Image (cartoon, helix red, strand yellow):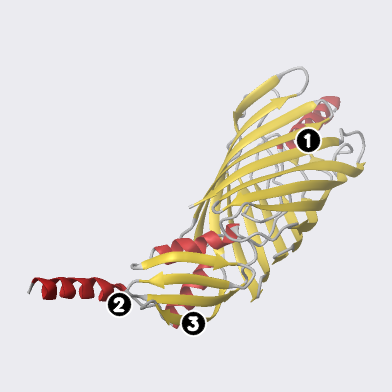
Amino acid sequence: MKKQFIAIVVSMLLISPVFAAGTHYEMRVDGLACPFCAFGIEKKLKAIEGSSDISVDLNKGLVKVNMAEGQTLTEEQMTTLFNDAGFTYRSMKTTSLEK
Amino acid sequence: MIGIQFKGFVAVTTSLLVGLISSPAFAHDPIFGIGPHVLFKDGIELAAEVESKKTGNVNSQALVFDFKYGITGDWAVGFDLPYSFKDNGTNSSSGNGDVAVFTKYRFWRKDSLGLQDSAAVLLKVITDTAASNENPSLNKGTTDTILGLTYGSEGRKWYRWASARYRFNGTNNAGVDRGDKILLDFVGGIRPTPTNYMEPDTVWLLELNGEYGQRAEFGGAEQVNSGGSEWFISPGIFWTKRNFAIKAGIQIPIYSNLNGTQQESDYRAKATFEWHM
């Protein structure tokens, strides 16, 4: 009985990342030339609930962000967000953070 | 008659010397010229600027607090609060300078990978709020308005800008029509090492700034010792990290054709610290 209980607990711990998983977004953005100007993007993405690990690759025109499970980003939302930040949103790729 | 001429000369000279022609510094815009940069929507920029100018025996300095707000991603408004110092070799004075309010609208933007081409219009009103009872005077005695048009191309490595401003100088309290001014700027910049977001970033600039001033008028008569043109070559630097920026530059006169007897510019310098929130 004790062994079964330990096995259940271990199993739950091992599969717990699946429940904590979210989505990784990689967005193509045009107009990104200077590091100083990208701050508005970071600020606006940070203001979205569930966002984390924001990064900007100026050379590739990529903005990356992780969203917590249950939180999503839409094309329309990103078009507005990047326009408000002074840039042009082109497209996005999503990847599940589940392992 | 001589008294009127002398009064006019003093008034014209004072007016011209008071006007440290400052342009609102926007992020990666030229130091002395203007550029099409604005702020992100709901963004706030706080800046502290130090300006220094020497013209003959007159030294002028100003400390300027600058505030900007992004109404949209393409439209910003702001104001300047200057505190001025002046020394003419005999007397010195200090006090509040002229408060200025401004707005800039980026009406065209073309974005591609690592490149942003854009154009904007600028409107700036320099009020008449400077201390008026100082010697030498800090007060120009009227409200001036500046209209500007600017184009900029910002890449990962190279920058270029071109802009034109028309400054409508008002008629001051002494009755002097100070003559309008046209300002032209051509600027190139290079980022030797294209750094990424969050990394310290340096951009070197070289500006060519031209100014043409109409003759002032007093009592319907053109003032001989007023107006003319000056050109400057102006090296400068941006240094930024995330949401902080330091910008500095110096204007060195390379050509001067001032009417009559006027003191030529020796130099103008500017340093700015900016914080985006």
Mark 1 is on which residue type? Val
What crowding class fits label 1: few (fewer than 14 Cα within 10 Å), some (14-19), or many (20 or more)? Answer: many
Work out whether residue B66 or residue B145 is closer to the camera in this orientation and state it.
B66
**In the image, is residue A31 above or below residue B222?**
below
Q: Is residue B45 visible?
A: yes
Q: Chain of mark 2?
A: A
Helix or strand or loop: what does disc 1 sit on?
helix
Please state which amino acid type lies under the numbered disc 3.
Lys
Q: How many marks?
A: 3
Q: Residues within 10 Å of mark 3 (few under 14, many from 20)?
A: few
Q: Position of residue A56 (x, y in %)?
A: 54, 66
Residue drawn 65% across and 56% down? B28
Per the image, the residue denoted by label 1 is B12
Query: Quadrant where the N terminus of chain B lies?
Result: top right
Residue B32 lies, with reference to residue A53, above or below; the image says: above
Residue that numbered label 3 is attached to: A93
Q: Earlier in the sequence, mark 3 or mark 2?
A: 2
Mark 2 highlights which residue?
A18
Residue B14's spot in the image, x, y percent? 75, 32
